[in-house]
Image (spheres, rainbow, N blue to C red):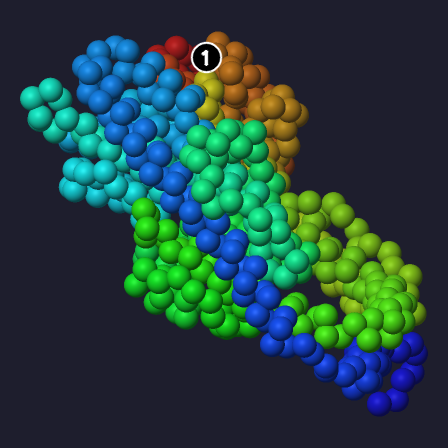
Amino acid sequence: MIRTQGLSTRFMVSGIVVLSVLITVVISLITSYRSEKNSLISMSFQMNSMYASKIAGTVNELFISEKSSMKANAEQVAKHWAQPEMDELTAYIKRSNSMFNTIIVIDKDGIMRSISPEMSPPLMGKKITSQGTLQALKERKPLISEPYISAANALVVLVSHPVYDAKGEYLGFIGGTIRLHESNLLNAILGQQAGEGGGVGASAGASAGTSASAIASAGASAGTSASTSSNASTGNGSYSYVVSSTGALLYHPDKSRIGQHVLENPIFSDLAAGRSGTKRITNTLGVDMLASYSYIEETGWGIVSQTPTSIVLEDAKRPMVHIATYVVSIMLVILIAIYWLIGRMSQPLTKLAQYAVMLSTTKSLQADVPRIHTWNREANALHRAFVMAFSRIRTQLDHLSLEAQTDALTGLNNRRTMDKYIGTWLQREIPFTIMLLDLDHFKQVNDNYGHEKGDEVLKFLASSMRALFEENHICCRYGGEEFVVLLPEADEGEALRYASQLRRFMAETNSPVGRPVTLSIGIARYPDIAQDAEMLFRSADEALYRAKHLGRNRIESASNAVVVS
């Protein structure tokens, strides 16, 4: 390729990328792989196993406590089922239990009897058909649901207990929802513990027998720790997640993954069978992991604590740390240089691209092509093409816009523009008066003087209308020798005054054919005469017809107010 001016962007970027790859390859070739593989993997399994067992025991005890509490709440709800204090009781239960985001009471027909706090839009009194609700109504027993989308459009788990009255009749159920993407006691525990981490170097001394009441106190003080631990993994890459009995993720440091199914994960089959253990796996994202997992009997869930194998084996590369330090420094300098060069090269192209996008907006005709200063020949050529193309487009669009809105002969607004004004005023219910004008005996003008003179008469009438009417009056050519004037907010008296001025001017002024050419005018007002455009035009046309029939050179109103020459 012969370069006449500047360098091509492709050549420069390609050269920089090739140079970076070569440097990376050289660094990779001098890196050796030595490992204490077996001992490191064994230690990681042990630490992850201790952590998973601890969390599984904690969560299991928590749900035992919550199910017992929900049973007691169900007994209280049964006593107040038909009483006004139901909402206060529900609110009290919510305040005293930080595990649940929402406390709900639903009757046997699926109708929301009470909720705390209220949702937006309100759900009180509405029939709820979510998966968890239907399952609770069908089974009529204490249960912990699978994740589902609630009526409030949130991914939740429902812990529910049936409500029976003193006679043993089923009334409905009380439930607490745990929003998996939001802050609550369960997420606070999982997020806080994940921050402590498993894997190599993690602390595993916490007792697995923590009581549910102690957990509640710790969770309440944790506040929103779950929401702040969206990246809850340790510095060595270890992290934990919770999977349901159907393979759905209930907790994960990456909140965007909550609700996804991981049925293909090799660990899931063991957890589904109620087994705990350790295993080296390739997870659903294709990452080699050292995983320990523990089954939660109360819920059927599984706690998985895992560490990327590559991170565990990083300790084997310690002899190369000093070399890596130099490499990182070199790569940093190279990356900064690449970033600066590409930024300089792409800046003019970015400006032109942004301008190209703006061409599709309504502001495109007001904005000029941006100036650029660059030594890149493609950018310079593209800029010149933009300037020329935009100049032509602006000229053509201006011409087309004018043609689309005006009558070519008279320069007045055309029928399309008239319809647009009428439609807008009718929609906004703005009163206005329509004036329908017709030149008397115009066919004789064309027959006696020729069509060129006839056109001059039409242009003469148009110029007279522009001179005699106000700026806010819409003057239009309706077709042939018919014209329309729209007077917004004008009453019939005002319209008659303007119509009289125009009629008198035309009757007393010589036209291009050497004599006056008179007008007949029909007037109708919205909304006095008609409620839509069709009826309004029909009324004005009938008034015009009367003016013609009664001798021409006169004005007739649809309301029978008459001005005669």
Q: How many marks?
A: 1
Image x and y of residue 544, in percent: 38, 25
Instruction: Give the residue pinned by disc 1.
Output: 492
Which of 307 and 402 lies nearest the eye of the viewer? Answer: 307
Which of 477 and 105 lies nearest the eye of the viewer? Answer: 105
Which residue lies at the image location 76% right of the left edge and 48% below the top edge?
367
Which residue lies at the image location 30% right of the left edge and 35% below the top edge?
67
Answer left or right for 356 relative to 226: right
Q: Quadrant of the N terminus?
A: bottom right
The answer to which image quadrant residue 266 occupies is bottom left
Q: Is residue 541 above or below residue 64?
A: above
Which of 551 and 96 lies nearest the eye of the viewer? Answer: 96
Which residue lies at the image location 84% right of the left edge and 65% below the top edge?
339
Which residue lies at the image location 22% right of the left edge and 22% below the top edge?
75
Which of 471 and 74 lies nearest the eye of the viewer? Answer: 74
Q: Looking at the image, can residue 440 be seen? A: no
Answer left or right for 273 relative to 182: left
Q: For label 1, count other residues whose C-alpha is less than 10 Å away and answer few (under 14), some (14-19) or many (20+).
A: many
Answer left or right for 31 relative to 457: right
Name the amino acid, label 1: Glu
Image x and y of residue 139, in percent: 16, 42
Answer left or right for 138 relative to 296: left
Q: Looking at the image, can residue 470 be seen? A: yes
Image x and y of residue 137, in percent: 18, 37
The answer to which image quadrant residue 48 occupies is bottom right
Q: Is residue 277 above or below residue 414?
A: below
Is disc 1 placed on a helix, strand or loop?
Answer: helix
Image x and y of residue 112, in percent: 25, 27
